Amino acid sequence: MLDLVHQLNAEGGCGPNGQPSASVLAGIGRLIGADVTSYTKVDHRTNKLVGAAVEPAEQNISGSDEFQAVFAQHPGLAGYRSGQLKLGESVAMTDLAELRQLRRLPLYVDFYQSRGTLDQLLCMATLDQRHGTTLALNRSSRGFSERDRAVLDLLTPHLVQASARAVRMAELTTAVHHLSRQADRLDLALDALPGLTRTERAVVEHVAGGLTDRETARVLAVSPRTVQKHLENIYRKLGVSNRTSLAALLDKERF
């Protein structure tokens, strides 16, 4: 488990969307003894499966229209509503429904039993107002030991932490790239400042002073429409799109 926790926290342990990597899922499966391990995201308002990472990948049937059509029959959804499936606490599919009930479900008969899955251990990892993510481990025999459940309960918080960190790092990386692009655009805009005419620079000075188009027009003895036309030319020359962008530029370089 310690090796797996280390792998989770290493680079690539979870993707930018928070899903654990294939090697992490495979490691969880080996640790507990599962044939298929998946990390799913479910819309608990609509009972729709909206995302799944599965190992082995060839066992991923989440994209099947037929599977999606019967997914609402999954006992985990009813278990969530009844309080049997709780955040961070493992529960087996056969804890949530008796075998005779499962055998009446096309989901179980056509998509689990037919593929050799007779039971599934579930642990809800995260939950918000709309979605829940769950670790699910499929096994070709019924029942999971207390050891299996304890291991999954101990491991799940580490997965949640690693997943949240991966998502946050992806957001920060995106923000840095965005700021870098903004800085590049500002540098290009500064290079274009000498290209402004005397009147355009005067308009910029008044805008920087907080004057409206009408007030600027009064000071320059022109019409508000003329001021707007000057601003359009200024935006084009400086590579900005509006007053907010222009203000950001002026904060960097005062006229």
Image (cartoon, rainbow, N blue to C red):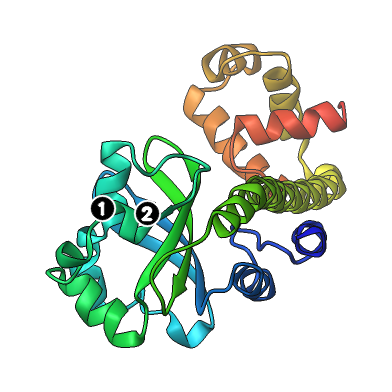
Q: Amino acid at mark 2?
A: Val
Answer left or right for 79 relative to 9: left
Q: Amino acid at mark 1?
A: Asn
Residue 185 seen in this snapshot: yes
Q: Earlier in the sequence, mark 1 or mark 2?
A: 2
Q: Position of residue 166 (x, y in %)?
A: 70, 53
Q: Which residue is mark 1?
A: 47
Q: Which residue is mark 2?
A: 42
Element under label 1?
loop
Distance between the Cα atoms at labels 1 and 2? 7 Å
> Looking at the rendering, in which quadrant would you find the C terminus?
top right
Residue sitting at 32 percent across and 60 percent down?
94
Q: Position of residue 157 (x, y in %)?
A: 64, 45
- In the image, 151 versus 161, the foreground residue is 151
Residue sitting at 66 percent across and 44 percent down?
240
Residue 199 seen in this snapshot: no
Residue sitting at 20 percent across and 60 percent down?
73
- In the image, 107 versus 14, the foreground residue is 107
Q: Position of residue 180 (x, y in %)?
A: 80, 51
- In the image, 242 versus 64, the foreground residue is 64
Q: Position of residue 177 (x, y in %)?
A: 76, 54
> Looking at the rendering, in which quadrant would you find the N terminus?
bottom right
* Mark 1 crowdedness (10 Å alpha carbons): few <14, some 14-19, many ≥20: some
* Mark 2 crowdedness (10 Å alpha carbons): few <14, some 14-19, many ≥20: some
- In the image, 211 versus 128, the foreground residue is 128
Answer left or right for 180 relative to 231: right
Residue sitting at 76 percent across and 22 percent down?
205
Whether tag 1 and tag 2 are in contact, CB under 8 A, the answer is: yes
Element under label 2?
strand
